[in-house]
């Protein structure tokens, strides 16, 4: 399988400022029906982060914290794991397994241009196998 990450990545990305509230992120996730939002760097020395539905449920709601009072940067995961758009799918799968992660962001230079989730990997694998028969 020689599929490149750029062939299967999702380019529908949502971003949020680090000082936004968790409630703002929650609204965005529900409204767009997505599972993660990229947290923008707060300055040139900072890096991208990510906040997921899982983060909100387990770090905020499960601890009875008020999503209106918690800032996104307080619970986001940093740095995000990124790979180049030319990376082969096989390498991506190994990376996801090694770090036990459900999504990897795709970069072009310093810019994040896409994301690949486990579901994207499954879909690509099914399509690839279907083409062989």
Image: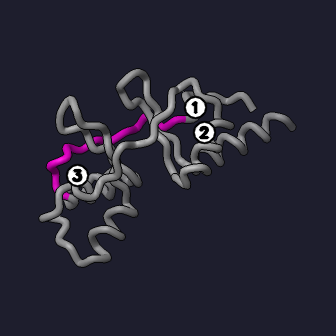
Determine crowd level at label 1: few under 14, some 14-19, many 20+ residues with C-alpha closer than 10 A: many
Q: Residues within 10 Å of mark 2 (few under 14, many from 20)?
A: many
Which SS type dominates the magenta stretch?
Answer: loop
Q: Residue furthest front?
A: 45
Q: Residue at x 25, y 54 (%)?
A: 25
Q: Is residue 106 left or right of residue 38?
A: right
Label 1 sits on a secondary structure element that is helix
Disc 2 designates what residue?
A: 92
- The residue most toward the top is 109
Question: Toward which corner of the image does residue 15 lie, by quadrant?
Answer: top left
Q: Residue 73 bears which disc, if any?
A: 3
Q: Which residue is mark 1?
A: 5
**Above or below: residue 118 compared with residue 114:** below
Left or right: residue 75 versus residue 96 is: left
For image coordinates 27% across by 52% down, the residue present is: 28
Task: In the rendered structure, find residue 100 and report the number of the disc placed on it.
Answer: none
Residue 7 in the image: state x and y as whole percent.
58, 29
In-front residue for pair 57/73 = 73
Bounds of the magenta segment? 9-21
């Amino acid at each position: 399988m020689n599929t490149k990450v750029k062939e299967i990545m999702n380019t529908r990305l949502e971003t949020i400022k680090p000082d936004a509230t968790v409630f703002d992120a929650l609204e965005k996730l529900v409204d767009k029906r997505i599972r993660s939002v990229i947290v923008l760097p707060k300055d040139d020395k900072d890096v991208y982060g990510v906040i997921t539905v899982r983060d909100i449920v387990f770090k905020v709601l499960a601890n009875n914290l008020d999503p209106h009072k918690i800032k996104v940067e307080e619970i986001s995961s940093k740095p995000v794991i990124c790979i180049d758009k030319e990376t082969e799918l096989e390498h991506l799968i190994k990376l996801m397994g090694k770090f036990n992660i459900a999504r990897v962001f795709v970069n072009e230079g310093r810019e994040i241009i896409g994301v690949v989730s486990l579901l994207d990997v499954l879909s690509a694998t099914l399509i690839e196998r279907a083409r062989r028969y």
